[in-house]
Amino acid sequence: MKDSKSKMNAEGWEVNPPPPNKIKLPAMVEIPAGEFLMGTSSDNIKQLQLKESDWAYDWSDNDLFAAEQPQHVVRLPAFEIGQFPVTNLEYHTFIWDSGHRIPRSWTGFTFPEDAEAHPVAGVSKLDAEAYIAWLNQKTGENFRLPTEAEWELAARGTDGRIYPWGNTFDPWRCNTAESIKKGTTLVGTYSPGGDSIYGVADMVGNVWEWTQSLFLPYPYRPNANREEVKPNGRYVVRGGAWYYTRKLARCSVREGALPGHVSPSLGFRLARSFS
């Protein structure tokens, strides 16, 4: 009798599942309540023009910083955010248990060799939400995607810094095109040097990360329906990725994508409220 969990590979051969993995709760980092500077200021742009004139002047001349402006003060309650993005191994357990579709970068029902601790990529916002619903059902927890304000606070702290570690780009602190890795890296590879002041890893580079916030103009106002579900809405992704340059590896960079969009550079991390 076939195992109810058996799968069929592309050639039609039955593939038995790996031994069941115990669901391990992700490491979460508490971010205290408070105010922070969200977005990019004129001073930030001047700093970038001084240190990275090869692209910052062009961005300014073509108004490419507009989506990040104006810089404004946002106050948030305390929350938790994943210390790392969700990994291939964590997502693999979900795939085997639920039968959910696999990421495009996987072969058969498994991730690339030696990539179990890399961030899962090639998942849509809908996929991420399916994983979270499964994880919550299995564990009784209340995980969710972070809002874009929570993500930015966890990345840059309260002092308006440009990168998680300060105001000067350093290719040794994150996985971007400048690192020439040509793919994702183990989560935490650049810790602690690339971590935010709260100890959150991989906030820039490696993979873009989904948030639950609609891609709308600033200023950001909590509780202003920016996190409502809109099937045709564009949602904010954050952090840049391994095949994007340092231009997008800034804490305030924001891009928008439809909830069904998938990319080999797009993953997610978890968040959780205290109430």
Image (cartoon, rainbow, N blue to C red):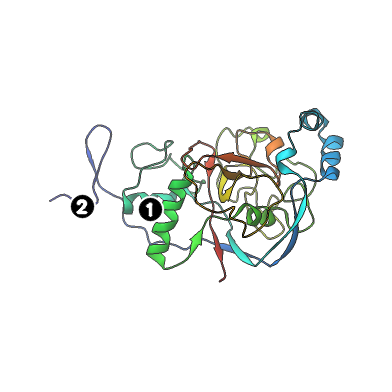
What amino acid is at disc 2?
Answer: Ser
Local crowd at mark 2 within 10 Å, few (<14), some, or many (≥20)?
few
The residue at 36%/43% (across/down) is: 101
- Identify the residue under disc 1: 94
Whether residue 171 is visible here, answered yes or no, is no
- Identify the residue under disc 2: 4
Task: Please determine whether, in this image, residue 241 is positioned above or below residue 155.
Answer: above
In this rendered view, identify the residue nearer to me: 191 or 47: 47
Residue 79 percent across, percent down from the top left? 61, 65
Q: Earlier in the sequence, mark 1 or mark 2?
A: 2
- Label 2 residue SS: loop
Residue 109 percent across, percent down from the top left? 34, 42
What amino acid is at disc 1?
Answer: Phe
The answer to whether residue 43 is left or right of residue 4 is right
In this rendered view, identify the residue nearer to me: 133 or 120: 133
Distance Cα–Cα, label 1 vs label 2? 16 Å
In this rendered view, identify the residue nearer to me: 111 or 123: 123
